[in-house]
Image: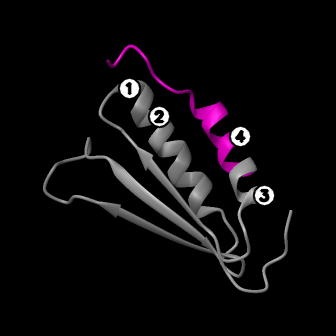
Amino acid sequence: EKRCTTRWDTTLRALGLALEWLSEEGLLVVVAYPGHEAGAREAEEVREWMGALAGEWWEVQRLQAVNRGRAAPELWMVQGRRGRRRG
């Protein structure tokens, strides 16, 4: 149902809270669905947010099918690095 969407601003707030709660070497997995207008905006905001995470504290990976076009879902994985600062 493409009329029922999440909002990018609340998604980013939820991601920030999830990182605060994540254990030192925990793993956060996020799937973005850019197949419609609201999802495309949300996916772009998630890409920017993920790209801005400090590399010394977080390892960020992205997986996306290359043969499905720009609307293919994006799988993001964020893992805390040993010794990272909390908060």
* View extreme (left): residue: 67
> What segment carries the magenta color?
1-16
The amino acid marked with disc number 2 is: Arg
Is 14 left, or right, of 27 in this rendering?
Answer: right
Q: Real-space Cα distance between discs 4 and 3?
A: 11 Å
Q: Give the labeled residue for mark 2.
A: 41
Q: Secondary structure at mark 3?
A: helix
Is disc 3 surrounded by few (<14), some (14 to 19) or many (20+) residues within 10 Å?
few
Given the current orientation, which residue lies at the most extreme bottom position? 82
For marks 2 and 3, the one nearer the N-term is: 3
Q: Give the quarter of the figure containing the N terminus.
A: top left
For the residues carrying marks 3 and 1, which lies nearer the camera in this image? Answer: 3
Question: In the rendered view, would you say 4 is above or below 14?
Answer: above
What residue does disc 3 label?
Answer: 20
Which of marks 1 and 3 precedes in the sequence?
A: 3
Task: Give the image location of residue 50, x and y in percent.
Answer: 58, 59
